Amino acid sequence: MRLCALDRRSLVALRIVVALCVLYDLIERADTLEFYTSGAPGSCIQPPQHTQHHAPPHLLWFYRGSMALQMALFAVAAAAAASLGCGRRPCASALLCWVSLVGIQGRAECVNDGSDKLLRNVLLWCVVLPLGEPPPSGGAATMLVSSAATAGLTLQLAGMYAALLVQRWDAPGWWAEQSAVHYALVSPFASTALGRHAAALPGLTRCLTTAGLGAELLAPLLLLLTPASHPLRLLPVALLAGMHGGVRLLLRLPGFTRIAAGVMLAFVPSHTWEALGWHAPLPAPQHAS
């Protein structure tokens, strides 16, 4: 369990980033608020009856109603995210934020993607993670926290990348051909201008495919095997955050890359915060008896 320990300062950074991601997601969805209502036929992108959630609790949770109701529900979600980011009752704020966000996503499922699943899963872990400010005293030992929640978050992130590797094991374009990045970038739907230029360089795209596979293989192992107090823990953080940053430059996948890179802040090792000037509190003074 100690190998899955996280630094409290990293969890504070995670709390802020997750709150900002939720707020950004709400802003993006607000432009199409009518999609989430039970408006006239043609005014919403997904008819209310076209859903797999027909249980009574889901009918209440994903109820659409009027535009005014959805504006109020969006406001509740935004307030919960702001409260989470500011550290006001973080566990309760994360729970309210998760309930609100899942409800919003469930009202227009056809516009969701993998980034929405990742965000709500990380947000649910925030409900049970210690996201409050570090204690004012107690020394460096109090900065590390190890629990079922820290282990769960670590294992879920490692499992996500492990599942990708298993999925790609026999898939064409990855291990043998190393052409997956090339074919992703030649698509005009998703590639950026820089991505289209990169697609014209087969040697570069082969290197990028290999580098991506290497990062997805090495980084999860380091997350599982390196303690949070060890400087080497910064390597998987840099590998995965850098990989997602590179993907964002080449492909129009802003949601997933933003969230996946931001989540890596939870694994920043203790020595990095010390180097940045966020020092662990001094031990409490020992009073002579």
Image (cartoon, rainbow, N blue to C red):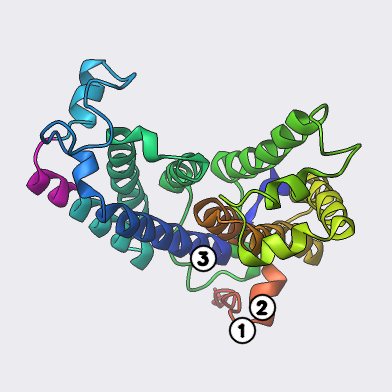
Q: At 86% from the left edge and 52% from the top edge, which residue is drawn?
A: 206
From the image, tell me which residue sits under label 1: 277
Quarter of the figure that contains the N terminus: top right
Q: SS at mark 1?
A: loop
Which one is nearer the viewer's eye here, 251 or 98? Answer: 251
| Kind of residue at disc 1 | Gly
Based on the displayed image, in which of its 4 quarters is residue 45 positioned?
top left
Which one is nearer the viewer's eye here, 24 or 9? Answer: 24
Along the horizontal axis of the image, is 278 left or right of 196? left
Please report whichever mark, 3 or 2, sits nearer to the chain's N-terminal start.
Answer: 3
Q: Residue furthest top?
A: 55
From the image, tell me which residue sits under label 2: 274
CA separation in Å, label 1 and label 2: 5 Å
User: Compared with residue 96, is residue 282 higher up or lower down, i.e. above or below?
Assistant: below
Q: At 79% from the left edge and 67% from the top edge, which residue is drawn?
A: 231
Q: Can residue 7 be seen in this snapshot?
A: no
From the image, tell me which residue sits under label 3: 13
Please state the extent of the stretch shown in magenta in the rendering. 65-73
Which one is nearer the viewer's eye here, 253 or 11? Answer: 253
**Answer yes or no: do the residues labelled 1 and 2 have beta carbons within 8 Å?**
yes
